[in-house]
Image: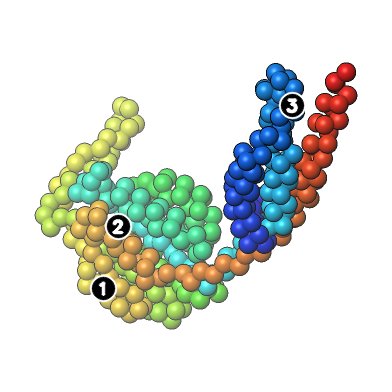
Amino acid sequence: MTRGVPHLADPAWLLLLLALPLLAWLHHRRAAHGALTYSRLPVGRGVGRSWRLHLPFYARLLALACLVLALARPQLGYALEESLTEGIDIEIILDISGSMGAEDFKPKNRLTVAKQVVRDFVAGRPGDRIGLVVFSGGAMTRAPLTTDRAMLDTLVDEIQLNALPDGTAIGVALANAASRLKDSQAKSKVAVLVTDGINNAGEIDPLSAAAVCEGLGIKVYTVGVGGSKGLVNVPMPTPPNPLTGRSEMRYVQMLLPVDETLLRSIAQRTGGRFFLATDPQSLRQIFREIDRLEKTPLQIRRYVRYQEVFPPLVWSALGLLLLPFATTFLRVTAEP
């Protein structure tokens, strides 16, 4: 709802305002030729008050301007915009296993970059319902399908590594997302799976979960996150110190291959696409491409209710027309 929407119902009347400078020029030109008309004014008393000679004309000129604006019918009102979308329901499936802490994605690690990219993706799709599933050795729904962008942004920002048992349960995560989308009445149902590992946990085979998605009409886009072909520094928590009870982080050199064959098979089976992100820039480009492929048709209906506000202009014009008479009366009563 937008308040105070300015509007002119008949703006063509404003063309008459172009005549006002011409009328003022003609008035002064005529006054110059008829200077002898004012020769009977008392010397000294009218020198500083010659403006009064032009007051009636300029009052009528301003009155004309007010009437022209009134004829243009200025209006104020309320505009109601209603967005109509052919909604898309989207589940983001984000890997939070320890390997996502690999520091080959600057400025910090893979998960930090992935979280920011997901937040930008969510913010750019106001017409869709979006849910969030995180996984490592198990899977957990962080947010149901919702249009609450502020809540989603907060939940994505709060995601931490190692919040679940370690591992990479791709099949479980995909099945979890499918269960959230199975009752959706949206025209299109989409899952975006972001992972950097090989399925090594969970009781559900990823290809079986993909078959379920296929049967439910869910299109799966898979994104493999792998920025290095060699050893990568990965922070790993140490066992708690018996004296302090605290865990410390140590860096371990690890090989982190992405199961491209599996991710490509999941995408192809469900009608989606497989992408490989090798750095932060390519990950951002991948999400822009997914955003383009799954663009939501948007229509806007606009309803406006206006209130006429020209009456004050009419009253102002009437006041300006009466102003010369009022000043003449005051002058006559003030003079002895």
Which amino acid type is marked by label 1? Arg
Which residue is rendered at x = 85% and y = 21% of the image?
Answer: 334
Vertical order, 257 against 53 (above or below): below
Q: Position of residue 210 (x, y in %)?
A: 36, 75
Q: Which mark is residue 41?
A: 3
Foreground pick, 126 / 223: 126
Q: Which residue is mark 2?
A: 284
Q: Position of residue 96 (x, y in %)?
A: 34, 53
The answer to whether 25 appears left or right of 244 in the picture is: right
Nearer mark to the viewer, of 1 and 2: 2
Q: CA distance from mark 2 to mark 3?
A: 83 Å
N-terminal-most mark, 1 or 2: 1
Nearer mark to the viewer, of 2 and 3: 3
The answer to whether 266 appears left or right of 36 in the picture is: left
Which amino acid type is marked by label 3? Leu
N-terminal-most mark, 2 or 3: 3
Foreground pick, 236 / 323: 323
How has the structure been colored for display? rainbow
Q: Which mark is residue 166?
A: none
Q: Secondary structure at mark 2?
A: helix
Q: CA distance from mark 1 to mark 2?
A: 19 Å
Q: Secondary structure at mark 1?
A: helix
Nearer mark to the viewer, of 1 and 3: 3
Using a 10 Å C-alpha cutoff, classify the residue at mark 2 as few (fewer than 14 neighbours), some (14 to 19) or many (20 or more).
some
Q: Which residue is mark 1?
A: 264
Q: Secondary structure at mark 3?
A: loop
Vertical order, 282 against 41 (above or below): below
